[in-house]
Image (spheres, rainbow, N blue to C red):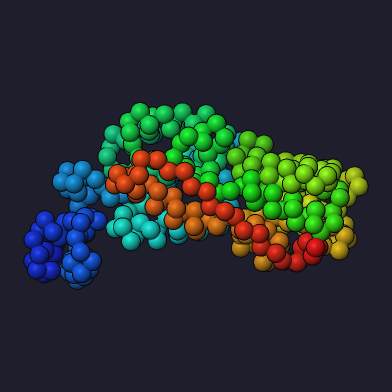
Amino acid sequence: MTTLKDVAALAGVSTATASLALNGGPVNARTREQVKKAARQLNYVPNRVGQILTLGRSNTIELIIMTSEKYPDVVRKTSLYYYLMEGMLGVADQRNVSVRFAVKSYEDRGFSSYFSKLIGSRMVDGVIILPQFTHDHHFVRILQEAKFPHILLQPSVFSAQMNHVDMGNFEGGRLVGDLFVKGGAERIGIINGPAAHVDAIERERGFTTALFEAGAALVAKVNGDFTIESGYQGMQQIASRKLPDAIFCANDYMAAGALRYLRSIGVRAPEDIAIAGYDNSDIATALDPELTTVDNRFFDLGAELTTGLLSIIDGSSESIAVTIRPQLVLRKSHRTP
Protein backbone atom coordinates (compact mmCIF):
# COMPACT_ATOMS: atom_id res chain seq x y z
CA MET A 1 0.00 0.00 0.00
CA THR A 2 1.42 3.37 -1.04
CA THR A 3 2.06 5.77 1.83
CA LEU A 4 2.65 9.51 2.02
CA LYS A 5 6.29 8.73 2.74
CA ASP A 6 6.54 6.94 -0.64
CA VAL A 7 5.06 9.97 -2.42
CA ALA A 8 7.47 12.32 -0.65
CA ALA A 9 10.45 10.15 -1.62
CA LEU A 10 9.47 10.06 -5.29
CA ALA A 11 8.85 13.82 -5.33
CA GLY A 12 12.14 14.51 -3.55
CA VAL A 13 10.59 16.43 -0.66
CA SER A 14 9.98 15.84 3.04
CA THR A 15 6.87 14.02 4.24
CA ALA A 16 5.67 17.26 5.86
CA THR A 17 6.02 19.18 2.58
CA ALA A 18 4.20 16.41 0.69
CA SER A 19 1.34 16.62 3.19
CA LEU A 20 1.09 20.39 2.79
CA ALA A 21 1.17 20.13 -1.00
CA LEU A 22 -1.65 17.59 -1.11
CA ASN A 23 -3.79 19.41 1.43
CA GLY A 24 -3.70 22.98 0.17
CA GLY A 25 -0.90 24.11 2.47
CA PRO A 26 1.60 26.94 1.88
CA VAL A 27 3.99 25.50 -0.72
CA ASN A 28 4.99 26.93 -4.10
CA ALA A 29 3.15 25.88 -7.25
CA ARG A 30 6.08 23.92 -8.67
CA THR A 31 6.44 21.80 -5.52
CA ARG A 32 2.69 21.22 -5.32
CA GLU A 33 2.55 19.96 -8.89
CA GLN A 34 5.65 17.81 -8.34
CA VAL A 35 4.03 16.13 -5.34
CA LYS A 36 0.67 15.69 -7.10
CA LYS A 37 2.42 14.08 -10.06
CA ALA A 38 4.18 11.63 -7.74
CA ALA A 39 0.87 10.84 -6.02
CA ARG A 40 -0.77 10.10 -9.38
CA GLN A 41 2.10 7.87 -10.47
CA LEU A 42 1.86 5.84 -7.26
CA ASN A 43 -1.97 5.85 -7.18
CA TYR A 44 -1.79 7.33 -3.71
CA VAL A 45 -5.11 7.61 -1.86
CA PRO A 46 -5.05 9.94 1.19
CA ASN A 47 -6.18 8.53 4.52
CA ARG A 48 -9.05 10.81 5.54
CA VAL A 49 -8.94 9.80 9.19
CA GLY A 50 -5.22 10.49 9.26
CA GLN A 51 -5.76 13.89 7.69
CA ILE A 52 -8.30 14.81 10.33
CA LEU A 53 -6.03 13.73 13.17
CA THR A 54 -2.92 15.38 11.71
CA LEU A 55 -4.33 18.57 10.19
CA GLY A 56 -7.59 19.03 12.07
CA ARG A 57 -9.33 19.07 8.69
CA SER A 58 -10.90 16.53 6.36
CA ASN A 59 -10.52 18.63 3.20
CA THR A 60 -14.13 17.73 2.47
CA ILE A 61 -17.21 19.94 2.26
CA GLU A 62 -20.87 18.97 1.90
CA LEU A 63 -23.70 20.31 -0.24
CA ILE A 64 -27.08 19.89 1.47
CA ILE A 65 -30.25 20.55 -0.54
CA MET A 66 -33.39 20.92 1.54
CA THR A 67 -36.68 19.56 0.17
CA SER A 68 -40.25 19.26 1.41
CA GLU A 69 -42.54 16.25 1.15
CA LYS A 70 -45.36 18.67 0.30
CA TYR A 71 -43.93 19.34 -3.17
CA PRO A 72 -42.31 17.37 -6.02
CA ASP A 73 -38.56 16.87 -5.66
CA VAL A 74 -37.20 19.22 -8.33
CA VAL A 75 -33.65 18.15 -7.42
CA ARG A 76 -34.25 14.91 -9.30
CA LYS A 77 -36.60 16.37 -11.94
CA THR A 78 -34.41 19.15 -13.35
CA SER A 79 -30.86 19.48 -14.64
CA LEU A 80 -30.15 22.76 -12.85
CA TYR A 81 -28.34 21.27 -9.90
CA TYR A 82 -25.87 19.60 -12.22
CA TYR A 83 -24.58 23.04 -13.24
CA LEU A 84 -24.42 24.21 -9.64
CA MET A 85 -22.39 21.15 -8.66
CA GLU A 86 -20.16 21.57 -11.72
CA GLY A 87 -19.32 25.07 -10.51
CA MET A 88 -18.66 23.76 -7.01
CA LEU A 89 -16.43 20.93 -8.19
CA GLY A 90 -14.35 23.24 -10.37
CA VAL A 91 -13.34 25.34 -7.36
CA ALA A 92 -13.05 22.36 -5.01
CA ASP A 93 -10.75 20.51 -7.41
CA GLN A 94 -8.42 23.51 -7.64
CA ARG A 95 -8.21 23.55 -3.85
CA ASN A 96 -7.85 19.76 -3.54
CA VAL A 97 -11.13 19.54 -1.63
CA SER A 98 -13.67 16.71 -1.90
CA VAL A 99 -17.43 17.34 -2.09
CA ARG A 100 -20.20 15.25 -0.51
CA PHE A 101 -23.85 15.59 -1.50
CA ALA A 102 -27.03 15.12 0.56
CA VAL A 103 -30.75 15.78 0.10
CA LYS A 104 -32.70 16.30 3.34
CA SER A 105 -36.41 16.84 3.91
CA TYR A 106 -37.74 19.37 6.40
CA GLU A 107 -40.25 16.73 7.47
CA ASP A 108 -37.55 14.16 8.29
CA ARG A 109 -37.63 13.43 12.03
CA GLY A 110 -33.85 13.13 12.15
CA PHE A 111 -33.35 16.42 10.33
CA SER A 112 -32.09 18.51 13.27
CA SER A 113 -29.84 15.80 14.67
CA TYR A 114 -28.21 15.38 11.25
CA PHE A 115 -26.40 18.71 11.61
CA SER A 116 -25.25 17.97 15.15
CA LYS A 117 -23.88 14.61 14.05
CA LEU A 118 -22.20 16.20 11.05
CA ILE A 119 -20.41 18.71 13.27
CA GLY A 120 -19.37 16.05 15.77
CA SER A 121 -18.06 13.63 13.16
CA ARG A 122 -15.45 16.09 11.82
CA MET A 123 -15.79 14.33 8.47
CA VAL A 124 -16.50 17.63 6.70
CA ASP A 125 -15.00 21.08 7.24
CA GLY A 126 -18.10 23.05 6.29
CA VAL A 127 -21.47 22.93 4.53
CA ILE A 128 -23.24 24.65 1.66
CA ILE A 129 -27.01 24.66 2.19
CA LEU A 130 -29.82 25.26 -0.31
CA PRO A 131 -32.84 25.93 1.98
CA GLN A 132 -35.38 26.41 -0.88
CA PHE A 133 -38.42 26.91 1.37
CA THR A 134 -39.35 29.50 4.02
CA HIS A 135 -39.27 27.03 6.89
CA ASP A 136 -37.70 27.92 10.22
CA HIS A 137 -33.97 27.76 9.60
CA HIS A 138 -33.27 26.47 13.12
CA PHE A 139 -30.48 24.27 11.78
CA VAL A 140 -28.42 27.39 11.11
CA ARG A 141 -28.47 28.22 14.82
CA ILE A 142 -26.89 24.83 15.47
CA LEU A 143 -24.11 25.67 13.01
CA GLN A 144 -23.65 29.20 14.37
CA GLU A 145 -23.45 28.08 18.00
CA ALA A 146 -20.81 25.49 17.08
CA LYS A 147 -18.98 28.10 14.93
CA PHE A 148 -19.10 25.56 12.13
CA PRO A 149 -18.36 27.02 8.65
CA HIS A 150 -21.50 27.29 6.54
CA ILE A 151 -23.05 29.28 3.71
CA LEU A 152 -26.56 29.38 2.24
CA LEU A 153 -27.92 29.97 -1.24
CA GLN A 154 -30.62 32.66 -1.38
CA PRO A 155 -31.81 32.74 2.23
CA SER A 156 -35.29 34.09 2.84
CA VAL A 157 -35.55 37.73 3.92
CA PHE A 158 -35.64 37.03 7.64
CA SER A 159 -32.29 35.21 7.47
CA ALA A 160 -30.38 37.80 5.45
CA GLN A 161 -27.71 38.08 8.17
CA MET A 162 -26.55 34.54 7.48
CA ASN A 163 -23.54 33.82 5.26
CA HIS A 164 -25.13 33.64 1.84
CA VAL A 165 -24.95 33.99 -1.92
CA ASP A 166 -28.08 35.66 -3.31
CA MET A 167 -29.13 34.42 -6.77
CA GLY A 168 -30.88 37.69 -7.62
CA ASN A 169 -34.41 36.34 -8.03
CA PHE A 170 -36.01 39.74 -7.39
CA GLU A 171 -33.95 41.32 -10.14
CA GLY A 172 -34.64 38.42 -12.50
CA GLY A 173 -38.40 38.75 -12.03
CA ARG A 174 -38.12 42.45 -12.62
CA LEU A 175 -36.28 41.88 -15.91
CA VAL A 176 -39.23 39.85 -17.20
CA GLY A 177 -41.77 42.44 -16.05
CA ASP A 178 -39.87 45.23 -17.78
CA LEU A 179 -39.62 43.14 -20.96
CA PHE A 180 -43.38 42.54 -21.12
CA VAL A 181 -44.22 46.19 -20.50
CA LYS A 182 -41.78 47.40 -23.16
CA GLY A 183 -43.30 44.86 -25.54
CA GLY A 184 -46.69 46.55 -25.16
CA ALA A 185 -48.40 44.05 -22.84
CA GLU A 186 -51.10 45.62 -20.66
CA ARG A 187 -52.89 42.58 -19.20
CA ILE A 188 -50.33 40.23 -17.71
CA GLY A 189 -50.44 36.93 -15.81
CA ILE A 190 -48.07 34.74 -13.80
CA ILE A 191 -47.81 31.02 -13.14
CA ASN A 192 -45.67 30.94 -10.04
CA GLY A 193 -44.01 28.19 -8.04
CA PRO A 194 -45.03 27.04 -4.53
CA ALA A 195 -46.15 29.88 -2.26
CA ALA A 196 -43.59 28.84 0.37
CA HIS A 197 -40.64 28.62 -2.02
CA VAL A 198 -38.08 31.42 -1.63
CA ASP A 199 -37.32 31.60 -5.37
CA ALA A 200 -41.02 31.88 -6.24
CA ILE A 201 -41.63 34.61 -3.67
CA GLU A 202 -38.74 36.76 -4.84
CA ARG A 203 -39.39 36.27 -8.57
CA GLU A 204 -43.00 37.32 -8.17
CA ARG A 205 -42.02 40.29 -6.01
CA GLY A 206 -39.59 41.61 -8.64
CA PHE A 207 -42.05 40.92 -11.46
CA THR A 208 -45.02 42.68 -9.84
CA THR A 209 -42.83 45.62 -8.80
CA ALA A 210 -41.97 46.22 -12.47
CA LEU A 211 -45.65 46.01 -13.46
CA PHE A 212 -46.76 48.36 -10.68
CA GLU A 213 -44.18 50.98 -11.58
CA ALA A 214 -45.25 50.86 -15.26
CA GLY A 215 -48.97 50.90 -14.50
CA ALA A 216 -49.58 47.48 -16.07
CA ALA A 217 -52.25 45.18 -14.65
CA LEU A 218 -51.65 41.72 -13.17
CA VAL A 219 -54.90 40.06 -14.22
CA ALA A 220 -54.16 36.38 -13.48
CA LYS A 221 -52.10 34.45 -10.96
CA VAL A 222 -51.90 30.75 -10.13
CA ASN A 223 -49.37 28.77 -8.13
CA GLY A 224 -47.81 25.60 -9.51
CA ASP A 225 -44.99 23.42 -8.21
CA PHE A 226 -42.25 23.98 -10.83
CA THR A 227 -43.29 20.91 -12.86
CA ILE A 228 -44.47 20.72 -16.49
CA GLU A 229 -47.82 19.32 -15.32
CA SER A 230 -48.50 22.28 -13.04
CA GLY A 231 -47.67 24.70 -15.86
CA TYR A 232 -50.19 22.93 -18.10
CA GLN A 233 -52.88 23.02 -15.41
CA GLY A 234 -52.10 26.62 -14.50
CA MET A 235 -52.41 27.76 -18.11
CA GLN A 236 -55.65 25.81 -18.46
CA GLN A 237 -57.03 27.63 -15.42
CA ILE A 238 -55.98 31.06 -16.72
CA ALA A 239 -57.33 30.33 -20.22
CA SER A 240 -60.76 29.54 -18.80
CA ARG A 241 -61.12 33.31 -18.56
CA LYS A 242 -59.93 35.99 -21.00
CA LEU A 243 -56.32 35.33 -22.00
CA PRO A 244 -53.79 37.96 -20.89
CA ASP A 245 -51.34 39.58 -23.29
CA ALA A 246 -48.35 37.90 -21.64
CA ILE A 247 -47.58 35.13 -19.14
CA PHE A 248 -44.53 34.84 -16.87
CA CYS A 249 -43.82 31.27 -15.74
CA ALA A 250 -41.49 31.18 -12.74
CA ASN A 251 -39.44 28.37 -14.24
CA ASP A 252 -38.90 26.87 -17.70
CA TYR A 253 -40.62 23.58 -16.91
CA MET A 254 -43.90 25.29 -16.08
CA ALA A 255 -43.48 27.40 -19.24
CA ALA A 256 -43.18 24.15 -21.23
CA GLY A 257 -46.47 22.94 -19.77
CA ALA A 258 -48.14 26.30 -20.47
CA LEU A 259 -46.99 26.25 -24.10
CA ARG A 260 -48.28 22.70 -24.50
CA TYR A 261 -51.74 23.70 -23.30
CA LEU A 262 -51.82 26.83 -25.47
CA ARG A 263 -50.95 24.75 -28.52
CA SER A 264 -53.77 22.31 -27.67
CA ILE A 265 -56.33 25.14 -27.93
CA GLY A 266 -54.78 26.75 -31.00
CA VAL A 267 -53.20 29.75 -29.25
CA ARG A 268 -49.83 30.79 -30.66
CA ALA A 269 -46.82 32.31 -28.89
CA PRO A 270 -45.77 35.02 -29.32
CA GLU A 271 -48.41 36.03 -31.92
CA ASP A 272 -51.39 35.62 -29.56
CA ILE A 273 -49.64 35.69 -26.20
CA ALA A 274 -46.09 36.40 -25.07
CA ILE A 275 -44.48 33.94 -22.65
CA ALA A 276 -41.26 33.84 -20.64
CA GLY A 277 -39.75 31.32 -18.26
CA TYR A 278 -36.94 31.30 -15.73
CA ASP A 279 -33.67 29.38 -15.17
CA ASN A 280 -32.42 29.02 -18.77
CA SER A 281 -32.53 25.25 -18.37
CA ASP A 282 -31.91 22.77 -21.18
CA ILE A 283 -35.61 22.56 -21.98
CA ALA A 284 -35.74 26.26 -22.99
CA THR A 285 -34.11 25.67 -26.38
CA ALA A 286 -36.01 22.43 -27.01
CA LEU A 287 -39.39 24.18 -27.03
CA ASP A 288 -41.19 25.61 -30.05
CA PRO A 289 -40.93 28.55 -30.00
CA GLU A 290 -37.61 28.67 -28.15
CA LEU A 291 -38.21 30.18 -24.74
CA THR A 292 -37.24 33.64 -23.57
CA THR A 293 -36.02 33.13 -20.03
CA VAL A 294 -33.72 34.33 -17.25
CA ASP A 295 -30.31 32.76 -16.75
CA ASN A 296 -29.65 32.55 -13.02
CA ARG A 297 -26.05 31.46 -13.68
CA PHE A 298 -26.09 28.28 -11.63
CA PHE A 299 -22.48 27.43 -12.52
CA ASP A 300 -21.31 30.79 -11.15
CA LEU A 301 -23.49 30.32 -8.07
CA GLY A 302 -21.83 26.97 -7.33
CA ALA A 303 -18.37 28.45 -7.76
CA GLU A 304 -19.16 31.46 -5.55
CA LEU A 305 -20.72 29.32 -2.81
CA THR A 306 -17.64 27.09 -2.70
CA THR A 307 -15.17 29.98 -2.81
CA GLY A 308 -17.06 31.70 0.01
CA LEU A 309 -17.23 28.60 2.20
CA LEU A 310 -13.53 27.83 1.74
CA SER A 311 -12.62 31.41 2.65
CA ILE A 312 -14.57 31.00 5.91
CA ILE A 313 -12.87 27.66 6.59
CA ASP A 314 -9.36 29.03 6.05
CA GLY A 315 -10.11 32.17 8.07
CA SER A 316 -9.65 34.72 5.28
CA SER A 317 -13.31 35.84 5.61
CA GLU A 318 -15.56 36.04 8.66
CA SER A 319 -18.81 36.56 6.76
CA ILE A 320 -20.05 36.29 3.18
CA ALA A 321 -22.82 38.26 1.46
CA VAL A 322 -22.65 38.10 -2.35
CA THR A 323 -25.23 38.61 -5.10
CA ILE A 324 -24.96 36.98 -8.54
CA ARG A 325 -26.84 39.09 -11.08
CA PRO A 326 -29.15 37.10 -13.42
CA GLN A 327 -29.27 37.76 -17.15
CA LEU A 328 -32.23 37.97 -19.52
CA VAL A 329 -31.96 35.56 -22.47
CA LEU A 330 -34.08 36.73 -25.41
CA ARG A 331 -35.51 34.08 -27.70
CA LYS A 332 -38.69 33.74 -29.80
CA SER A 333 -41.54 33.29 -27.28
CA HIS A 334 -42.00 37.00 -26.56
CA ARG A 335 -42.86 40.01 -28.67
CA THR A 336 -39.85 42.10 -29.64
CA PRO A 337 -40.16 45.62 -28.16
Left or right placement of residue 21 versus residue 261 in this view:
left
Where the C terminus falls, by quadrant? bottom right
Position of 231 with respect to 243 (left or right) is: left
Viewer-nearest residue: 44 or 160: 160
Is residue 149 at least partly visible in the picture? yes
At 20% from the left and 64% from the top, the residue drawn is 28
Residue 101 in sight here: no
Is 33 placed above or below 229 here?
below
Residue at 87 percent across and 60 percent down: it is 272
- The residue furthest front is 213
Residue 24 in the figure: left or right of residue 256: left
Would you place residue 219 above or below residue 88 in this image?
above
Number of numbered discs overlaid on the protein picture: 0
Residue 315 position in % (x across, y down):
30, 44
Task: Name which residue lies at 69% across and 49% down.
Answer: 174
Q: Where, quadrant-wise, is the N terminus in this rendering? A: bottom left
Residue 208 in percent (x, y) is at: 74, 43
Residue 250's place in the image compared with 35, above or below, is above
**Residue 117 as seen in the image, left or right of residue 233:** left
- The quarter of the picture where residue 115 lies is top left
Closer-to-camera residue (100/311):
311
Image coords of residue 264 (percent x, y): 84, 58
- Comparing 311 with 116, the one in front is 311
Give the residue at the far right of this rendering: 242
Residue 72 percent location from the top left of the image: 61, 43
Residue drawn at x 66%, y 62% is: 329
